[in-house]
Image: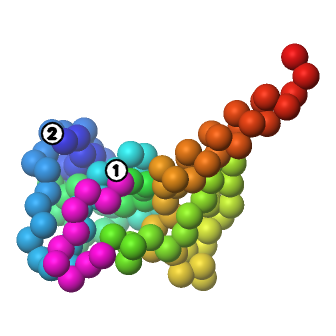
Amino acid sequence: MKALVYGGPGKIDLKEVPVPLITRPTDALVKMTKTTICGTDLGIIKGKVPDVKPGTTLGHEGVGVIEEVGAKLHPQQLITHHFALDDILEAYNVFGNAQEQKAIKVIITPETVKAQLTASAEKRKKQPA
């Protein structure tokens, strides 16, 4: 899989890295479908976080599909909010205020995508040609 890897102050690379494995009962493996870096990552890249060593994978802001969970987790424990595609700005606001909103992850689920696509198709059918 691809990952953005810290190489030291001012150095980052997109590298091929091993797919992580579940090693503890509280682990979760989430296949990221969209991700980005944030201000914390930018501070790391600038060398302002000396505890972060070269070889560290960056990027923790993301949306993904839960692939596997450890024995002590249920996938629903990882989902705190659901949003349809039309509500992406609301999702952004919730994720931007994650601490106040008690949001662990903001996830747009296949069910909400399917419902949104169905609603959009119905709306188009009702519009005059």
Label 2 element class: strand
> Dot 2, how many residues are within 10 Å of its Cα: few (below 14), some (14-19), or many (20+)?
few
Kindly tell me whether residue 9 is visible in this rendering: no
- Comparing 26 with 74, the one in front is 74
> Is 91 on the left-hand or right-hand side of 106?
right
Q: Residue 9, image x and y in percent?
A: 27, 53
Q: Is residue 55 magenta?
A: no
Q: Residue 115, image x and y in percent?
A: 61, 48
Label 1 or label 2, whichever lies nearer to me, is 1
Segment colored magenta: 65-74
> Is 110 on the left-hand or right-hand side of 87?
left
- Comparing 22 with 61, the one in front is 22
- In the picture of the structure, the residue carrying the numbered disc 1 is 32
Location of the C terminus (image quadrant): top right
| Of the image marks 1 and 2, the number of the one nearer the N terminus | 2
Q: Residue at x 12, y 77 (%)?
A: 24
